[in-house]
Each structure stands twice: as structure tokens, then as C-alpha cells.
Amino acid sequence: MKYQPINSNLFVKNRKNFMAKMSENSLAVFNSNDIYPVSADSTLPFEQHRDIFYLSGVDQEESILVLFPDCPKPQYREILFLRETNEHIAVWEGDKLTKERAFEVSGVKTVFWLQDLEKVMSELMSYANTVYINTNEHYRANVETETREDRFTKWLRNKYPAHSVAKSNPILQRLRSVKDAIEIDLMQKACDITEKGFRRVLGFVKPGVWEYEIEAEYIHEFLRNRSKKFAYTPIIASGNNANVLHYIENNNQCNSGDLILMDVGAEYANYSADMTRTIPVSGKFTGRQKAVYNAVNKVKNEATKMLVPGTIWADYHVEVGKIMTDELLGLGLLDKADVQNEDPNWPAYKKYFMHGTSHHIGLDTHDYGLLHEPMQANMVFTVEPGIYLPDEGFGIRLEDDVIIQENESPFNLMRNIPIEADEIEDLMN
């Protein structure tokens, strides 16, 4: 792994918190992700399932974590099953976790090779009444591929049909949404790497560069700072491309007078940063561009203030919409009649700002979190308002990642990344 070792106390604590939520005499199982094929013998780069990583720190394929806090055999209350490594595997694929190294990473003392799985599970299931299965219930999920977790669940329910079944996901949605101090440090690292990429780009952009060249500058800086990749597919959108919310082609030339909307973030140790900045190709905003830019920045700053414990996500978005409406009126994009006659289900401001303002961020860019429940301290949210003006040939979005704090203002993990329009111009010139 490119990232520095993570203190195993994080994973010990995460397992303890999860097991405290399990019902009596129950067992929970978590699988690694598959390595997905492309064609021939090609595969996509491996990405660990965030749940098993969250609970163990194990970051390799063909791994299984079993939690059974009430097991009558204490040594079986936490178990890791790993693919057995040997000298041949080490030559062809590099080092894999040994049993000793797995303990150092995870804090799990009992480690078996995968060939022992069925035998051990047979004994464990004879003690357990309920098994927790891990299904993907994220509100944005749309999974068409059968995962390794899905296949294991099918096997388990077929082999042990008399056991009751419970769901891990509601527990994980609550636990993972509230970040530990170690997690926040890792997210700060991802944001700091993102800052380095952005500052590099500020000195690189000029009329005539191509969007993909800017993308290359980011990934260069990310990789040299121990990030393995972008946290998500980057958006480098110049001119009217910025008005396509999920523009990812990044294949156009950047012209004098245009703006470039850049929605990019580095990952670090599987944790995500999510930043958006909009900069002028020529190094200077026009008067109109700066007015719109400052309006978006004001909405972002006012929205950030509302990210406090107890806030309800849906109510928050209503209030952000009111702030955006005022700014759009000031810019002459809406008039009072537009607002008075608006459809409550699609307010007038949605013509220019059609997406949400905030989402959870952490191990996933759109991280776990139950949006109908009040916000809590140590949740981390993006704040990303935008104004999109296809008739004027530009769109502006600004985005930071902030931590909700108890009895304090939200803490901006991207506080050091330039955002004020004048500062952007100064740095580019």
C-alpha cells in the first residue's frame, strides 16, 4: 500500500462498537470485494470493500472477517480468514498478509487460511442463532453485479436455512457516518494532498491547455504524495462543459476568457477528499464571472454555518435554497414573480442550482449516513453549491469538506485550499 500504516486501535474500536449493537448470540460476516475482470486476463485495480476495511484494516482480496461476541470459545469472537500466502505467490503478486502481519494491521488475534472456512463456520453456526449479512443499502446504490458478498450470503443462507437473518448495514450506516479522530486525520491527509494538486494546477493553467493535461497534473501530484488515485472520476470542465454536472470526458481545449470547473479529490488510505474549485483560464475573472463566483461562495459560507449537531438534512437544504434564491435575485437571474409563482416541489432557484448542497464523505465519497436522522458531531459533509448558466457559457461550483463539531463552528478540512476570487487571481498571476 502507498499509505503509511494506520494505528490498529481504530479497527479494534470499530469492531467493539459494531459488536455492541449486535443482538444476543449472533454472528456477522464481512467479505472483501472481488477483483473484477475487464477482458482476456485484464482486471480492474483492486478496491477493498469499505466495510471490511473499516472493521479490520485488511486491504487485500479474498479476505473474510467474522464477528461473534457471544461465542462460547473466546478465541473465536473475532476471526480473520485470509488467502494463504507462500513464496510462489510472493514472487508473482508480491507480499500478502501473513497471520502475524494481519494481527499487526487489524488487532484480530485469530487468523485462519481460507481453506479452513467451512469447517470453522460449521462450528460457529452451531452456537449462533442469528447471522448478520452485509447488503448494500446506500441511498445512491444501484448494483447490477453480483458481488463476492452476495455469493457468500447465498451460500450461507442455503447451508444454514434455520438461522435468523439480520442486517449489518443499518449499524454501519450509523457508525461509519461519525468519524474517529484517526479517520479525521486520514481525511485531512487526503485534503492536504488535494491542496497540493490544486496549487500545482494554478501555476499550470493558461489559454490553450487541454482539460486532460490538467487532470494529469493532479494525478502526478497525488501519486507523489502517497495517494493511489483520484477518490472519484475527476471533472475538469471548461466553458459550457461545466453545465454538465457529471462531465468526465476531460478532452476539450481551454480557451481564453473561459472558466474551468474542477471537481477533484485525492484518496488516501481509502479515505476520500472531495473538492471543487472554479478558476479563470486567463488568470482573471470578468466582472460578471466574479459576481456569480462571489454569490456561490457566499452561499457556501452561509450553508456551512448550518452544519451543526441536530440539523436535519432535508430542512437544511430548504434553508440553503432560500439563501441561493436571494443571491439569484441579486444577480438578476430571478425576479420576484419567479419566486412568487414557483412550484414548491421544484423551487425557482433549481433552474440554476439543481443538485443537493451536501453529502456525507469518508471511506466513500458519498459515504454512509442516514439522512433522516439529525446530524451529529464528527460527521463530515461536503458543502457544494453551484450556479450553472449555459446561456452565458459558464458554470461555477465551489466545494469544501467540513466536520460538524460540538459547541463549535464547523471545521473546514480544506481551509488552506485557496477559494477567494482575488486570491485565485493573485496566485495565477
Image (spheres, helix red, strand yellow):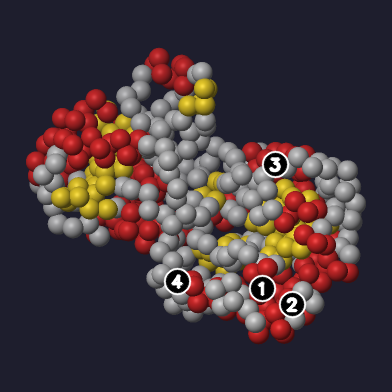
Q: What element carries label 1?
A: helix
Q: Is mark 3 on a helix, strand or loop?
A: loop
Q: In this view, does 95 lie above or below 316?
A: above
Q: Give the mark nearer the N terminus: 1 vs 2.
A: 2
Is 272 on the left or on the right of 101, as rendered? right
Instruction: Name the spot of residue 385 as percent of width and height, x first.
Output: 65, 66
Is 399 on the left or on the right of 202, as rendered? left
Please identify the residue farthest to the top as the structure is shown: 88
Residue 349 numbered tag? 1
Per the image, the residue denoted by label 3 is 249
Residue 247 numbered tag? none
Q: Residues within 10 Å of mark 4 (few under 14, many from 20)?
A: many
- Which amino acid, mark 4? Met
Instruction: Name the spot of residue 394 as percent of width and height, x first.
Output: 79, 59
In space, the residues marked 3 and 1 are separated at their CA atoms by: 28 Å
Q: Give the mark nearer the N terminus: 3 vs 4.
A: 3
Q: Give the mark nearer the N terminus: 3 vs 2.
A: 3
Q: Give the mark nearer the N terminus: 4 vs 2.
A: 2
Q: Give the mark nearer the N terminus: 3 vs 1.
A: 3
Q: In this view, does 83 lie above or below 151?
A: above
Per the image, the residue denoted by label 2 is 334
Frontmost residue, 100 versus 283: 283
